[in-house]
């Protein structure tokens, strides 16, 4: 389902995350992208609270970049089928909500995106290769 790790690596580098992604497996890269998106969303939330429009825009742009150019572009519709299609649609929705949050300083939209990202991130943590190995053992 996540066939293009190169897109994930590029997006991760582009948002200046200080982690060595060259040695990370594809599953770990996706987890890092989720963590980066959550960090950017937290920064946006803080910027909204401070009424710092420039910082809000920068943080939301970073989150949009991670979601749209990292998570979404790493989907592989051929092997992921309907799940990949649904995740792509969800990522599009998240980007739209973040755009609205940026335009209006909409904290409710930020909170909605954060909750949805955390839910998917949690699912990815549960399906880690290590968790699958423990379930088999």
Image (cartoon, rainbow, N blue to C red):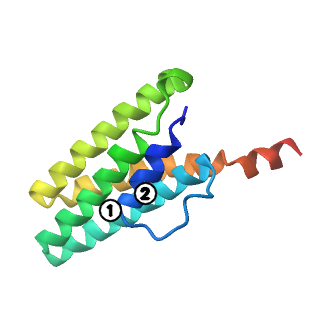
Q: Secondary structure at mark 2?
A: helix
Q: Nearer the viewer, residue 5 or 44?
A: 5
Pointer 1 residue: 41
The N terminus is located in which quarter? Answer: top right
**Closer to the eye: label 2 or 1:** 2
Q: Nearer the viewer, residue 68 or 109?
A: 68
Q: Nearer the viewer, residue 39 or 111?
A: 39
**How many residues crowd mark 1 within 10 Å: few (<14), some (14–19), many (20+)?**
many
Q: Quadrant of residue 44?
A: bottom left
Residue 95 to residue 107: above or below: above
Q: Which mark is residue 14?
A: none
Q: What is the residue that sits farthest to the bottom in this orientation?
A: 50
The residue at 16%/57% (across/down) is: 102
Q: Position of residue 56 (x, y in %)?
A: 19, 67
- Tally of numbered tags: 2
Pointer 2 residue: 12
The residue at 13%/74% (across/down) is: 51
């Amino acid at each position: 389902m996540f066939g293009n790790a190169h897109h994930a690596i590029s997006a991760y580098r582009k948002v200046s995350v200080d982690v060595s992604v060259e040695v990370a497996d594809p599953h770990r890269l996706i987890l890092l992208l989720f963590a980066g998106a959550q960090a950017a969303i937290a920064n946006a939330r803080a910027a909204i609270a401070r009424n710092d429009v420039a910082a809000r825009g920068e943080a939301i742009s970073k989150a949009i970049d991670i979601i749209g150019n990292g998570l979404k572009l790493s989907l592989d519709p051929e092997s992921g089928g309907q799940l990949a299609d649904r995740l792509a649609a969800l990522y599009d929705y998240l980007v739209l909500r973040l755009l609205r949050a940026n335009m209006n300083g909409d904290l409710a939209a930020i909170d909605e995106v954060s909750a949805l990202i955390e839910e998917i991130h949690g699912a990815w943590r549960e399906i880690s290769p290590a968790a699958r190995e423990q379930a088999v053992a």
